[in-house]
Amino acid sequence: MIHCPKFLGNFLKRKQSRLDKNFKKFRTRPAENGRQYRDWDILFNFMEYKKYRVRTPIKSFRDLEVYRQTTLLSSEVFQFVSMIKKNKKEKALLEEFKILYSQSKIVPKLIAESYGDKFSDKDMAMAKLEHSMRVISNIVAKIDFIVAVLKDKEFKESLNKILAKYQTQRVKINNLRRAWSRVYEAR
């Protein structure tokens, strides 16, 4: 059996015969451990990323993907605030959305500040990234509370989408923090 990279998993194992037809041009060669590798296996193994990497040159904090995405998420939360204002029945829910919006505005600000501080005070920059992750955790908790209170299914679905996006951004901020710490360890 031919070794398949981890990230391709069972899909390639099931489609092995079709792959053999498509990749006949790649030759088989022995490896150190006695397995047979194909050149395309080795090619795909280089595409498996285990560490966060910078995709494009970063010239300012506005080039950071996490800054752009959290700004967009903050604007989506603001749209909910305007939608709730139109519905005058739920004043308590409007207050919760205002709190959520104020928290969501803090995250891009902290990312921008941490980018500026990384040149002068690395510890403060890391602390601000960690603080932004804490704020995102608070936002996730607030969204969970609002989803539990809401009765409208459309609002619940759209808030759950925003919640998933915030969780993704939290992971990306953590990856950014680890990438910066690796860069500063090397210096």
Image: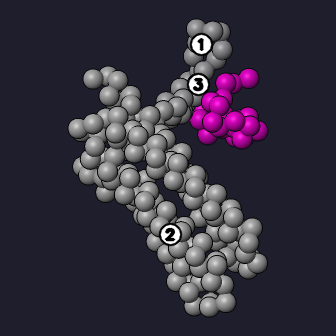
Label 2, label 1: how many angstroms apart (C-alpha)? 58 Å
In the image, is residue 146 above or below residue 5? Answer: below
In the image, is residue 71 above or below residue 66? Answer: below
Q: Name the residue under label 3.
A: 38
Between 8 and 149, which is closer to the camera in this rendering? 149
Between 29 and 51, which is closer to the camera in this rendering? 51
Q: What residue type is labelled 3?
A: Arg
Q: Residue 11: where, in percent of width, then height?
A: 72, 41
Q: Which amino acid does label 2 sit on?
A: Tyr
Front tag of 2 and 1: 2
Q: Residue at image x 58%, y 8%?
A: 32
Structural crowding at the residue carrying mark 1, measured as other residues with C-alpha within 10 Å and reported as few (<14), some (14–19) or many (≥20): few
Front tag of 2 and 3: 2
Q: Residue 62: where, in percent of width, then height?
A: 31, 57
Between 174 and 39, which is closer to the camera in this rendering? 174
Quarter where residue 26 is shown: top right
Structural crowding at the residue carrying mark 3, measured as other residues with C-alpha within 10 Å and reported as few (<14), some (14–19) or many (≥20): some
Q: Residue 93: where, in percent of width, then height?
A: 64, 77
